[in-house]
């Protein structure tokens, strides 16, 4: 749930690019060299950024992020906040 955690840390809403940069920073130790390589289909985009955008889309589809956010903006939904709270109670998230 790194995207939800990053959004939560900045108040629940943020610019997608900034949120993905926060996620990348948090995951720095687990990213591999291949994650920085560009996609063959989109040479300007590193794989890590594409994966982050895919994860964001998945969170929207799961109802954890609001689908009606303006382009380029991510917002945590009430379901997303509940999921984060459950993970916190289980000790499975960073503060």
Image: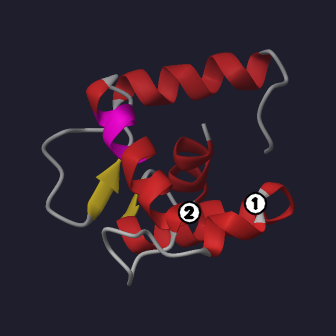
The mark that comes first in sequence, 1 or 2, is 1
Instruction: Give the magenta range.
Output: 56-60
Q: Nearer the viewer, residue 66 or 11?
A: 66
Expressed as whole percent of the image width and height from the top left, the position of residue 93 reads: 77, 34
Find disc 2 in the rendering and name its residue. Answer: 48
Q: Nearer the viewer, residue 21 or 66?
A: 21
Is residue 71 rendered to the left or right of residue 51?
Answer: left
Quadrant in the picture for residue 27: bottom right
Q: Please tell me whether mark 1 sits on a helix, a strand or a loop.
A: loop
Expressed as whole percent of the image width and height from the top left, the position of residue 63 reads: 31, 24
Expressed as whole percent of the image width and height from the top left, the position of residue 19 reads: 49, 64
**Could you say which disc has been placed on residue 31 in the image?**
1
Most extreme residue toward the front is 40
Q: Give the vertical position of 89 relative to 42 (above or below).
A: above
Q: Residue at x 15, y 63 (%)?
A: 71
Is residue 29 rendered to the left or right of residue 38?
Answer: right
CB under 8 Å between callouts 1 and 2? yes
């Amino acid at each position: 749930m790194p995207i939800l955690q990053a959004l939560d840390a900045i108040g629940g809403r943020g610019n997608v690019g900034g949120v993905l940069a926060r996620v990348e920073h948090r995951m720095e130790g687990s990213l591999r060299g291949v994650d920085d390589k560009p996609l063959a289909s989109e040479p300007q985009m590193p794989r890590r950024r594409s994966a982050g955008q895919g994860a964001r889309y998945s969170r929207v589809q799961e109802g954890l992020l609001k689908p009606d956010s303006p382009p380029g903006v991510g917002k945590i939904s009430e379901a997303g906040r509940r999921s984060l709270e459950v993970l916190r109670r289980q000790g499975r998230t960073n503060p």
